[in-house]
Amino acid sequence: MLTAVVVAPRFGFPTTTTPTPLWNDRPLPVAPAPVQAPNWVELAKQLKPAVVNVNTKRVEEGMPQLPGPMGRDDQFQQFFKQYFGNQRRTVRSLGSGFIINPSGYVLTNNHVTDKATEIHVKLADGRELSATVVGRDPKTDLALLKVDATGLPVIPLGDSSGLQVGAPVMAIGNPFGLEQTVTTGIVSATGRVIGEGPYDDFIQTDASINPGNSGGPLINGQGQAIGVNTAIFSQSGGSVGIGFAIAVNVAKPVVTQLAQTGRVERGWLGVSIQPVTPELA
């Protein structure tokens, strides 16, 4: 019995099958921008005159932190407190604000003017005017000031409800006492809650904001204020590209009430809780 063995030759030709890639390299169908990039040079020129420096003075009581003979010594502090009492000292601070009405109404942060015994506003033209507090709202950290002047330049208030992440913005203020400083960036996020109060609605931006910028405007590409610069996240005390501004749609109804009555009245629900006794049941 014969058995035939057929040997089929094998050749190392590569296959023509192309593997499916794990990624997508197609560009996004982004529509062209309807308008050109903001002209920050022209906007800064027009809006800087409406941004002011807010200088405050307040008096605090307390013991100065004096080191004892061997360094920090609580007994040494207690000795001076017992025989000399608390010391009064004057504290000065700097902030920013912006004019929203030509009759001298200035919007700023409440923490800029809180407990201040004197408030002065320095205008872009160099004039320094005494300011009074029309009203303040600690829950939103907003305050409305008034200076005795008319015909002042203003910054219009915009609409923050339709603000888009990635939109260009500009901040103007008084960081570290450096007057009329302009920085630019984008909207990094909206609707941020950072634990500053019960009505948190912050715009996050990477525009450089530092101590002294508080109360200054965050401005959109149309030259409107869409936020009030308020806080930063920083471990160093300076800007790390994470700043927060109160959304202007939060500020507008607050400002209206402050101008009318000097305070903000909010609705409340009159509900009380008590045990259900057999008589009530």
Image (spheres, rainbow, N blue to C red):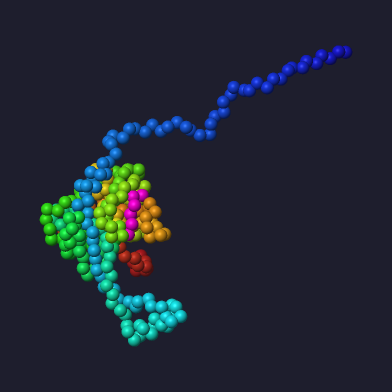
In the foreground, 129 or 196: 129
Location of the C terminus (image quadrant): bottom left
* Furthest-bottom residue in this view: 83
- Residue 257 seen from this side: no
In the displayed structure, 218 sits above or below 281; it is above
In the displayed structure, 30 sits above or below 7; it is below
Residue 279 location, quadrant: bottom left
* Furthest-right residue in this view: 1
In the image, is residue 207 part of the stretch drawn in magenta?
A: yes
In the displayed structure, 32 sits above or below 8; it is below
Residue 51 location, quadrant: bottom left
Q: Residue at x 17, y 55 (%)?
A: 125
Left or right: where 101 falls relative to 140: left
Residue 33 locus on image (x, y percent) = 31, 35
Residue 131 locus on image (x, y percent) = 18, 63
Q: Residue at x 39, y 58 (%)?
A: 234
- Residue 154 seen from this side: yes
Left or right: where 25 falls relative to 162: right
Residue 258 locus on image (x, y percent) = 20, 59
Task: Magenta stretch: give its range.
Answer: 206-211
